[in-house]
Amino acid sequence: MITTTDLRKVYRSRQREVVALDGVDLHVPEGEVFGVVGRSGAGKSSLIRCVNLLERPTSGTVTVDGTELTALSGPALRRARQQIGMIFQHFNLLSSRTARENVELPLEILGLGRRERATRATELLELVGLADRATAYPAQLSGGQKQRVGIARALAAKPKVLLSDEATSALDPETTRSILKLLRDLNRDLGLTVLLITHEMDVVKAVCDSAALMRSGRIVESGRVADLLATPGSELARELFPLGAAPTREGGTVIEITFHGESSGQPVIAQLARTYTVDPSILGASIETIGGRQVGRMRLELPGDFEQNVVPIGFLREKGLQVTVVSGEPRPPAAGTAVQERLLDGAEELGTQLLPDDDQPAGAKPAAATEPATTDQPAASDQPTTSNERGEKEDRA
Ligand SMILES: Nc1ncnc2c1ncn2[C@@H]1O[C@H](COP(=O)(O)OP(=O)(O)OP(=O)(O)O)[C@@H](O)[C@H]1O
Ligand SMILES: [Mg+2]
């Protein structure tokens, strides 16, 4: 539904040049809630503004619902942009207008008649649960209610895509949950594709089907949340399930395991302890329900060095768990490398010895790693940067 290819945005002023987007290839499937996370300054807002062309990218393309927006300008671009609604952190409501009049604003721009506007605005306020506050002014509304008006206004032109830049950052946790639920409902009921920018991992956990991590103007990781959790070495998985700093003490083998799917329902650690008479110490754990499925991570310390733990680790992998060796010899290189291969070899060699007779191997298979965007960009092009005024105004009004 939303595709960007090799998107670059360079802000230039007399003194300096900021590369805000450095070759972003983003793909948001139709009907998904897609979260983009990253530190401050990573380029998240620049990305979302380039997606609806509030900012003209320096180079690269943006395609929304089959239309390449970057190839358009003038009235054709304005028409295409009606497919895209946007909501903001600070709501951006006009204080001199009531809730309904705020929702009517885009309909006025579309040229709808007074009665039609009022009817549609009333429907939209009902949709967001604010029918009874239609005549209230923004100053008379709570933050959550203002954001509901913002959402109703964003939906006025019946867009297929909703962009959200930190739309819940100014709200308390409970109001955040209710707004996220509303976005989820709109996504399901209207088939709306939602691209949301957030710095809160809880938002990703609560509503996102997929997520991307941005750093220094690039997407360094992206994929469906469930797949990311099963991807060895995934930074997003680590952030979604923080286990704190790994201990540095000597003597044991520290492993991190990720449970997902069927494995999350099995008492695997107890089986491990019983079968191999090892005493694992739990150093950290985080279990959550995502999309109705239990997923989680756990950091364990197994007594003895790595060589002594090859078999128990192989057992865990056979049970369908993803296992990463954090410390203990030999040090594990990056994902999918020698140590894991050795673990698999070890498991094969040991064959059926590995599992008690009554246990069927769970057919552990590490999920395919998602491709990080690794496009190398040529030096910044000499194209002039378009003015940011419009975006700034809309964002900070
Ligand atoms: N209009 C602008 N002119 C010049 N530089 C800009 C402009 N907008 C953003 N930048 C710079 O581009 C980089 C990316 O900014 P952007 O606002 O996209 O980050 P962000 O990920 O949204 O950060 P935050 O989480 O703080 O909102 C930053 O270095 C920022 O200073
Ligand atoms: Mg931002």
Image: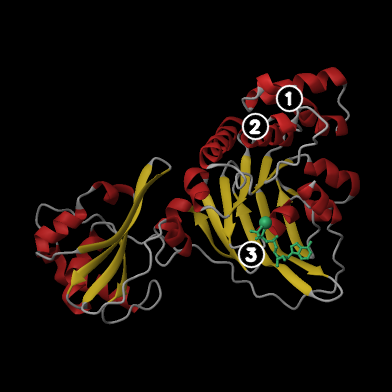
Which amino acid type corresponds to the residue marked 3 in the rendered image?
Ala
Snapshot quadrant of residue 43: bottom right
Queried on whether the Cβ of the residue with tag 3 lies below 8 angstroms from ligand 1, the answer reads yes
Please state the horizontal and vertical placement of residue 138, each as a whole percent of the image: 74, 32
Q: Choose the circle earlier in sequence order: 2 or 1.
A: 1
Q: Which residue is depicted at the point 38% across and 68% down?
A: 245
Task: Quickly name the residue at label 1.
Answer: 136
Discs 3, 1 touching: Cβ within 8 Å = no
Expressed as whole percent of the image width and height from the top left, the position of residue 212 reads 56, 58
What residue lies at 80% left-to-right and 27% top-to-bottom? Answer: 101
In the displayed structure, would residue 346 be above or below residue 29? below
Which residue is label 2 attached to?
145
Q: Amino acid at mark 1?
A: Ala
Q: Counting residues from the N terminus, which is met first, the one under dot 3 or under dot 1?
A: 3
Q: Which residue is mark 3?
A: 42
- Is any atom of residue 369 visible in this view? yes
Name the kind of residue labelled 2 in the image.
Gln
Query: Helix, strand, or loop for circle 2?
Result: helix
Find out whether the residues at labels 2 and 1 contact each other: C-beta distance under 8 Å: yes
Lateral position of residue 376 relative to residue 347, left or right: right
* First in sequence: mark 2 vs mark 3: 3
Question: Disc 2 to disc 3, how far (Cα)?
Answer: 29 Å
310 up-or-down from 292: above or below: below
What's the distance in space between the residues labelled 3 and 1, CA to CA?
37 Å
